[in-house]
Amino acid sequence: MDRVIQKKKWNTKKILTIVGVLALAALISASVYFTSGKSKLNVNTDRITISEIKKGTFQEFIPVNGVVLPITTIYLDAAEGGRVEEKYVEDGAVMTKGQPILRLSNTDLQLSLVNQETSVYNLLTQMQISRNAAQQNTVNKLNQMADVSSAFKEAERVYNLNKHLYEQKAIGLQEFKKSENEYNYQLERKRLTQQILRQDSASNDQQLSQAKQSYEGSQNALNVMRKKVGDLIVRAPVDGQLTSLDVEIGQNKNKGERLGQLDVLSGFKVRVDVDEHYISRIFTGLMGEFTFADKDYKLKITKVYTQVTNGRFQVDMQFIGDVPKGVRRGQTLQIRLALSDETQALLLPKGGFYQQTGGNWIFKVNESGTMAYKIDIQLGRQNPDYYEILQGLKPGDKVVTSSYENYGNMQELVLKKP
């Protein structure tokens, strides 16, 4: 009796065919997936930073450090060299104008002063002697003039009398001519004596003027010498605080050597170091801001030092408005130096993504928060907190701003919550 053989529904050939088709489909799918450029990476959201794009006030500024300095500093240099004999005050003392700080000694300078004083006194004595001699000579000339005048008047009287008598034929011609000659002699003698007296007076005036000029010159030299000796006592030129006093008793200081400095306490300025990269954008009038004791204060650049040293240059800033109470010389302030005015802009918080992308692209999170995909963006200005977005994003968009160092060439991030 024949037995019916049932045909197997799944045979080996059919199974192998199905497996081959599935493998081919998987290969095609994988090929399409990997050649489509949509490589993906699973990322835990607790390991990344997601930031939201917002529109707000943007100002380009750079963080810099400034040191508080007195508004004016006067350097104390040795006007004359010498040995430090005495210190009247110590470093840090608050001084008033003219108050002595220290005393130097200089025997050569003091000896020169004595010699100069002696020279002036000798000159003054010589002037007095010359003046007395000139006065005596003038008295003699005046006495001589008096004698001449008296003789002239007598000769004139006799001449006039004899002239009258001669006209009356009371005396002879010989006697008249004798009186006439005596009169003419005394007249000429009087003229010469008057001329000599005038010349003597002019000579005396000239000698007196020259002696006076010589004395005044010597006196000025003596005053200068006295001032130089007086400069051996170093005094405060203005009111202020004495700082950096570098002297010790017995120490020798050369002329022009720095002794210390005097800080005027009427106000403060801030000396700021800036990177040379910004030298073309820094100018007087730029504003800065810093926080002190939980309160904001403003500063303005008043002077730019264009000399670059070790890649940095300096500017001076002054306080605008209130000056912080308790601020001290040498204190360091962290300043936000503004390079632009405040404007409205799209703000992208700063993050580690910039090191891998250069600001050319970023991972944007989809609305459901499950995926982040790569998009191109364009950034503008920046400050320590934000980048300015020029293109590629809009307010409300969310992006991954943490580092992309481990993402390689991934095109999409699959965001997984832990």
Image (tube, helix red, strand yellow):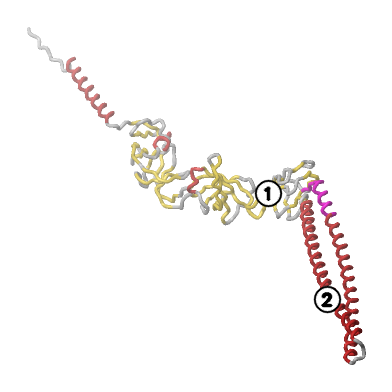
Question: To which residue does mark 2 refer?
Answer: 191
Q: Of the residues tagged 1 and 2, which is closer to the observer?
A: 2
166 shown above or below 255: below
Determine whether the residue tagged by mark 2 lies in a helix, strand or loop: helix
The front one of 316 and 61 is 316
State the CA–CA distance, disc 1 to disc 2: 70 Å
Residue type for callout 1? Tyr
Residue 354 horizontal side relative to residue 367, left or right: right
Quarter residue 391 falls in = top left
The front one of 393 and 277 is 277
> Looking at the magenta stretch, what is its main secondary structure?
helix
Q: How many marks?
A: 2
- The residues colored magenta run 102-118
Residue 192 horizontal side relative to residue 93, left or right: right
Q: Is residue 110 highlighted in magenta? A: yes
The quadrant of the rendering that contains the N terminus is: top left
Disc assigned to residue 75: 1
Residue 261 horizontal side relative to residue 282, left or right: right
Residue 16 at what x, y percent from top left? Answer: 20, 17
Callout 2 environment at 10 Å: few (<14), some (14 to 19), or many (20+)? some
269 shown above or below 37: below
Residue 315 at what x, y percent from top left? Answer: 56, 48
Q: Is residue 164 visible?
A: yes
Give the mark, 1 or 2, whose residue is nearer the N terminus.
1
